[in-house]
């Protein structure tokens, strides 16, 4: 059974940093592109970051570029999102999601498995 | 960036009736080399992560009931629930995965029971 379990969320002060993680199981993690999507309270879905299966291609939304860093450890079946210079606008549930793999080469497709999400709250 | 705009923002439908949600992209998301539309639909119930319903604009994800169908091409797309069930109350999102990022979502459409 495919499982994605996020962790590491919490309350952080404006300007602070936080790293959220996503533990994957039930599939060959190293073969899949992965994505982070966030959802602010009462709002819609926002694509945040993409990482290819071998981490050689990485993309970010403009809203997080230069502040967030996505990485993965295929040996540990884990995905990470390091977040710096956090503001109230980063308050959201952060989901990791598995790419369905519809695009043979570079780039994302849609997301067939999602974690339950981890809440990140930026507040003083 | 490609902007995805859904309509309506919300709709109320009687049980057993048809629900129709529209999604419009700011530019074509039809890739001419493979004639595929790079569009997906998701369902999100309260307190849950999104669930993939449709990809390639009209291909149903495994396990999705056949009352859900997707159609459209180019810039205009539709998600149809042919006979609304109580468990279909949710917010529905379209998402494009065409070209380079950002791979944006529509703002969502809330479906309720009338």
Image (cartoon, rainbow, N blue to C red):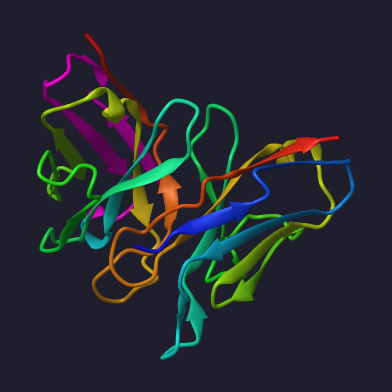
Number of numbered labels in the structure image: 0
Residue A26 visible in the shown view: no
Q: Going 12% across and 21% down the picture, which residue do you hit?
A: A15
Residue range in magenta is A1-29
A3 within the magenta span: yes
Near-viewer residue (B33 or B61)? B33
Q: Is residue B74 left or right of residue B69?
A: left
Q: Can residue A122 be seen at all in this image of the molecule?
A: yes
In the displayed structure image, the side of residue A53 where residue B72 appears, left or right: right
**Above or below: residue A14 compared with residue A40:** above
- Along the line of sight, which residue is nearer the eye, A1 or A42? A42
Q: Quick check: A10 above or below A108?
A: above
Task: Name the one closer to the observer, A74 or A104.
Answer: A104
* Residue A63 on the magenta span: no
- Picture quarter with the C terminus of chain B: top right
Residue lying farthest to the bottom in this orientation: B33
Task: Determine whether, in the image, residue A62 is placed left or right of residue A108.
Answer: left
- Please identify the residue farthest to the top as the structure is shown: A124
Q: Position of residue B101 (x, y in %)?
A: 29, 62
| Percent coordinates x, y for residue A71 in the rendering | 13, 46
Please, is residue B33 above or below residue B93 in the view? Answer: below
Q: Where does residue A41 sit, x and y in percent of width and height?
A: 44, 25
- Residue for point 36% across, 66% down: A101
Image coords of residue B66 (percent x, y): 74, 60
For image coordinates 31% across by 25% down, the residue present is A91
Q: Quadrant of the N terminus of chain B?
A: bottom left
């Amino acid at each position: 059974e495919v499982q994605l379990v996020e962790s590491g969320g919490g309350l952080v002060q404006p300007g602070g940093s936080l790293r959220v993680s996503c533990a994957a199981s039930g599939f060959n993690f190293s073969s899949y592109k992965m994505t982070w999507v966030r959802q602010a309270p009462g709002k819609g879905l926002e694509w945040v970051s993409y990482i290819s299966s071998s981490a050689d291609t990485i993309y970010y939304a403009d809203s997080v570029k230069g502040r967030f860093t996505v990485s993965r450890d295929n040996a540990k079946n884990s995905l990470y999102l390091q977040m710096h210079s956090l503001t109230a606008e980063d308050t959201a549930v952060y989901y990791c999601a598995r790419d369905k793999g519809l695009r043979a080469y570079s780039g994302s497709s849609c997301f067939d498995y999602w974690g339950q999400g981890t809440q990140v709250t930026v507040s003083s | 960036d490609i902007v995805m705009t859904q309509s309506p923002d919300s709709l109320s439908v009687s049980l057993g009736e048809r629900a129709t949600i529209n999604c419009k992209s700011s530019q074509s998301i039809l890739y001419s080399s493979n004639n595929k539309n790079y569009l997906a639909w998701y369902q999100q119930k309260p307190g849950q992560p999104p669930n993939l319903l449709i990809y390639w604009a009209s291909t149903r994800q495994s396990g999705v009931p056949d009352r859900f169908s997707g159609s459209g091409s180019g810039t205009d797309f539709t998600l149809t629930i042919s006979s609304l069930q109580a468990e279909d109350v949710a917010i529905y999102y379209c998402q494009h995965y065409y070209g380079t990022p950002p791979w944006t979502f529509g703002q969502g459409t809330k479906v309720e029971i009338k």
